[in-house]
Image (tube, helix red, strand yellow):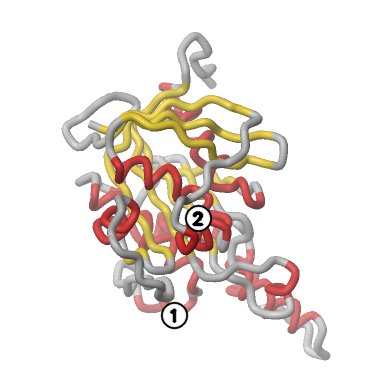
Amino acid sequence: MSEARTDVPLTAWIDGVALFAPGLAGWPAGRHVLSGGSFVAAPTEIPKLAVLPPAERRRVGTVVRLALATGLAACESASADPAELPSVFASSGGDGSNCHAICETLASRDRLISPIRFHNSVNNAASGYWGIATGAMAPSAIVSAFDGSFAAGLLEALVQLATPAETAGRLVLVAYDVPYPQPLQATRPMDDACGIGLVLHDREAAHSVARITLDTTTEAPTTMDDPRLEAVRTGNPIARGLPLLAALAAGGSRRVVLPIHEQLGLAVTVAAR
């Protein structure tokens, strides 16, 4: 395996963006709101999924539908073929509803677990369904880092882009989280689903909308000026990435800090085209 370049900052270009969050139904609408447009609170809208075969479609839950919709929207935004892109999937908890169903079965007299339940319980389930849906056979990484999952996924993506042998020049980052059912929700509360997707390139291209550079920092995370958007940011682990999308929407050059964990942040400098 080739080593990542260490003589230059971690840098990439954003070719495509996807966003599904409360009151932010897709990147065009989200960009309008994040650049100062009116925000109207509404549940997260997840597009209908038609790319899986019917049998597979019946087996997947909300978290997989959100992940696939997010990745496909990011690829569409970048005019990229999803079958050709390596991928990084980031989620703090995977399919909590499926894990809840498994726990219910294990707590019952009939403890036989369905094989479908089992393979949907692992954190790389969305990545597997992505391969089925798109035909992608490129490498796929899966990242989970609690409330820092979006930043950890972004960091993993840029490290891969800095390792030429690992990618074909660009990749798709798919970050997603869906609330758990009770009683898990009481311990790990989330307000609503959120998906953020980015197609990232190791060089500037025709579809590039911004250049980003990463560094680590001990600064506090960037918050949203609008209290309602701040509630969205803190209401889902993946929504911690909203300040980055707000910087993209605002244009120009901006610097934001995304949380990795309590003592460490990811400083992202955004230079929009």
Assign the C terminus to one quadrant of the image.
top left
Q: Position of residue 67 (x, y in %)?
A: 44, 60
Q: Amino acid at mark 1?
A: Arg
- Residue 177: x and y, percent? 54, 61
Q: Which residue is mark 2?
A: 239
Query: Would you place residue 95 above or below residue 6 in this image?
Result: below
x and y percent of residue 17 in the render?
A: 32, 48
Q: According to the image, label 1 marks what residue?
A: 58
Query: Does the rendering let one see residue 124?
Result: no
Quarter of the view holding residue 183: bottom right
Q: Earlier in the sequence, mark 1 or mark 2?
A: 1
Q: Amino acid at mark 2?
A: Ala
Q: Is residue 255 above or below residue 95?
A: above
| Quadrant housing residue 138 | top left
Badge 2 element: helix
How many C-alpha atoms fall within 10 Å of the one at disc 2: few (<14), some, or many (≥20)?
A: many
Dot 1: few (<14), some (14–19), or many (≥20) neighbours within 10 Å?
A: few
In front of the other: label 1 or label 2? 2
Going 40% across and 72% down the picture, which residue do you hit? 41
